[in-house]
Amino acid sequence: MILDRFRLDDRVAVVTGAGRGLGQGIAVGLAEAGADLVAVDIIELQETRRQIESQGRRCTAVVADLGKESSVQQIIDAALAAFGRIDILVNNAGIIRRAPFLEFSLRDWDEVMDINIRAVFLLSQAAARVMAGAGHGGKIINIASMLSFQGGVRVPSYTASKSAVMGLTKLMANELAPLGIQVNAIAPGYMATDNTAPLRRDAVRSKEILGRIPAGRWGEPADLQGAAVFLASAAADYVQGATLAVDGGWLAR
Ligand SMILES: NC(=O)c1ccc[n+]([C@@H]2O[C@H](COP(=O)([O-])OP(=O)(O)OC[C@H]3O[C@@H](n4cnc5c(N)ncnc54)[C@H](O)[C@@H]3O)[C@@H](O)[C@H]2O)c1
């Protein structure tokens, strides 16, 4: 049955940045489809855990700073201790710094690159080693951005990191396909989360952005759940290296 192939029963999913925003929505969506969760964030995860457990699924919360290399092993160890396996990794945690290119600081460059791409490389490598070692394959989903496709303004390190996410997704897809690991990305459009609060507070930018979205509204975390469940499931076993825009039509304009 095709609908059965979208189910995630008995799968274990690690989702980073699951404490709020898009990561919380994705984690709850995967739980609704049947997965148990390892929810990772630098902030507390009680609300995420509550929502996952209310789906009848199990949740292990890992409070860790993805800027630290040691967090990677902490996350892998916690997942294996709780569930004994990892089937799905969603690299969602991400940060943004806004300033004009001419004034942009090295600190704002390094901090964004550390979370948005360095940690994605390290955690994907560690999780893929576990998946490959267990011999059952798996799914890696990276959260890209409209700025994987476009330049943007006042966000140099964010654009560089999200363009790199799309490239690394394709490289990992190529190398991990023979191991039964599918690697894809989701590129959210303009979503109403803390990440975009400054844009929504700016009346001019907010009007400009909304005026360009064919769907006529900002996206919500729940808007990503369908794409995340699909790419995490057996229904997407032949989808490899893609970046799926979930953007209300933004890129089509
Ligand atoms: N909101 C949007 O419009 C939008 C659009 C495209 C892409 N994205 C991407 O989606 C992802 C989620 O963004 P969001 O909008 O939900 O943002 P958010 O700021 O609401 O949530 C990001 C989460 O990541 C966590 N995080 C940040 N730094 C961390 C660290 N060092 N260690 C562990 N966790 C850390 C935060 O605590 C937070 O819970 C990001 O990668 C973002 O770049 C967002």
Image (cartoon, rainbow, N blue to C red):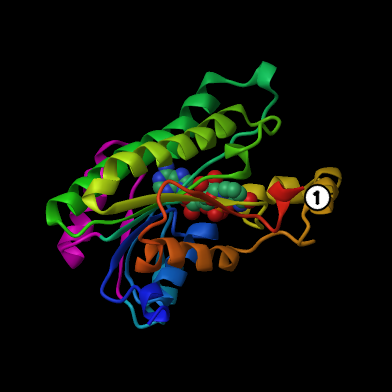
Q: Is residue 16 left or right of residue 25?
A: left
Residue at figure coordinates x 67%, y 28% from the top left = 99
Residue 220 percent across, percent down from the top left: 63, 64
Report the residue at 48% width, 39% height from top: 166
Specify the quadrant that holds the N terminus: bottom left
Q: Which residue corresponds to the image point at 15% horizontal and 56% vertical from the top-left?
A: 135
Q: Is residue 119 one of those drawn in magenta?
A: no
> Is residue 131 something that shows in the picture?
yes
Residue for badge 1:
212
Q: Quadrant of residue 118?
A: top left
Q: Residue at x 30, y 38 (%)?
A: 122
Over which residues does the magenta segment extend? 58-86
| 107 in relation to 140, above or below | above
Name the quadrant containing residue 68. top left
Q: Amino acid at mark 1?
A: Arg
Q: Is residue 153 left or right of residue 166?
A: right
Q: Position of residue 87 (x, y in %)?
A: 27, 61
Q: Secondary structure at mark 1?
A: helix
- Give x and y (percent) for residue 160: 54, 29
Judged left or right of residue 188, residue 169 is: left
Tally of numbered discs: 1
Can the viewer see residue 67 in this picture?
A: no
In the image, residue 109 lies at what x, y percent?
A: 52, 25
Question: Which is nearer the eye, 116 or 164?
Answer: 164
Task: Answer above or below: position of 35 versus 142.
Answer: below
